Each structure stands twice: as C-alpha cells, then as structure tokens.
Amino acid sequence: MQKLIPVGVSNRHLHVSREVLEKLFGISELTVYKSLYQKGEFASEQIVEMIGPAGKFSHVRILGALRNYVQVEVSGTDAYHLGIHPPVGKFAALPEGESVTLKGPKGSLVLTENIMIARRHIHINPTDAAELGVKDKDTVFVAPAHEKGDKMESRLCIMGNVLIRVHEDFLLQMHIDMDEANAIGLKTGDQVFIVSNSIGFYEDPTAPDKKLITESDVRQAILKKQKILIKKGIIVTPAARDLGNAHHIFTN
Ligand SMILES: [Zn+2]
C-alpha cells in the first residue's frame, strides 16, 4: 500500500530574524511554547499584533527557529481581512501603497514585502521520495484519505500543484493553510495520499486490496491513462499481462 501522508495545517504565523526579534521584543532568543512536528521547529511564546490597512489580528505567533529574514505567512482569507494582496508562494513586494505593521511589546516594524500566502507543499526525506517516485520541486496531485461515511467525505477533492520539498531532515508531512484545510475538510493529523506523480496515476491506497488484475482492468487503465501498480502477491492474468506490457501500463 502506498504511504499515507499526515497533514499539518498552518495558521497565520511569522518567522523572524534576531534583529527583528530584538526590535519587537527586546530579546535575542525566542522561547519555546510547543515543539512542532518537523525537526528543530517550534511555536514560540512570542506573539505580535499584525495590522493591515483594513483589519488586524492581535495574536500572531512567531515560529522558530530564528531565520536570517522576516517572513509572514497568511491565508487568503487573512489577507482579505487585513486588506492586502500578497503573492502566493514567493517573496515579492506587496502592491504599491500596501503595508502591514508588526507590533511587539518593545517596538514595531512596517513591512511592504516578505508577506505571502504559503504554497501547499509536502516535506519528504530522500528514502520516502524514492519510494513514492518523486523528487525535489516536483508537483503532484494529492487527495484526502477520507473514509466512506466520514463526515468530510462530501468535501473530497483532489489538490493539484502540490510542491515536493526533499531534505534528509524532513519528516513526511503535507503543509496546507487554514483556507485549504477547511475547504476540503482536513485537520492536522488527517492523512492524504499522492494520486499522481510524474510517472502517472496510482490506484487509491484506501481502496480494498486488489488481488487479481484482469484484461478488463488493463483496458480500464488504458482508457483512463492510468498506470497499474504491481505489488507483491498480486496475480496478473496472462491476457492482462500481454496487453499491459504492450501499453507499458505496469509499474512497481
Ligand atoms: Zn512546510
């Protein structure tokens, strides 16, 4: 069975440099509130007020560790509330005339850049990446592993353009923001699976295990332009094997 990927839902947050921390809080190190799933990452006890042209959020948490730059990550809904139009998934300036003020107990900082709507992505280590047939900077299609009858099943949807980020320190996890999570009925700890990667489509790993591949299965796969994953213990009928081989349908 293909690996299921746990989901981590990110609320609005920011990352800061030591310089910015000193300016806002008058301290040089963040203090840990709670460790996060990825190695070395934590929610700090430091909280700022975030003020935009149209609205504000009074409790926005800084995530550690310290970085070399300041980076604010908000959802599309947050951006609407603040009254700003940040780019998605990259560092770029806000449109002319827009800014966000970060306010701490000791000082404040006005930002006109380094604010973004984060891009959904999957953290993965090289071993898991090889197993799932993906590499760094690939994009994949992902679906929630909602079970039949699950109250969120009616929100089932496939997300495209999910960025793969490979690093040996990463633990397998997909990061999405609150908007995406709510739209498709996911919460932290739920699981998703890769529907298709660069080589083709997988079968649904939540489906009951198929033990026999027939010629009719292969015809279906050809029509749907799918690949069939041949796992240990699966029996392929001779007619299915001939047809599948001729169309390069099988993968393992
Ligand atoms: Zn992430």
Image (cartoon, rainbow, N blue to C red):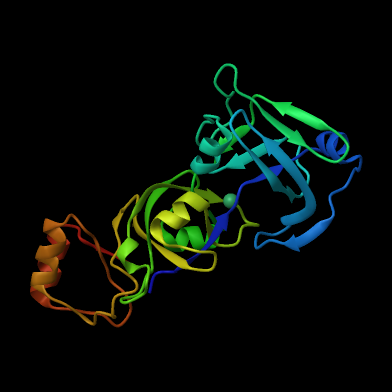
Residue 142 percent coordinates (x, y): 38, 57
Residue 227: x and y, percent?
Answer: 24, 60
Where in the figure is residue 246, as x and y percent of width and height? Answer: 12, 59
Q: Is residue 99 above or below residue 119?
A: above
Q: Name the residue nearer the viewer: 16 or 233.
A: 16
Image position, residue 35 (x, y; %): 73, 62
**Hey, which residue is sitting farthest top in the picture?**
96
Report the number of discs: 0
Image point (53%, 49%), residue name: 165
Q: Residue at x 12, y 64 (%)?
A: 220
Quarter of the picture containing the C terminus is bottom left
**In-image side of 159 versus 109 (left or right):** left
Q: Quadrant of residue 126?
A: bottom right
- Quadrant in which residue 205 is drawn: bottom left
Q: Of all residues shown, which one is farthest toward the front? A: 54
Q: Is residue 205 left or right of residue 39?
A: left
Which part of the image, by quadrant, shows the N terminus? bottom left
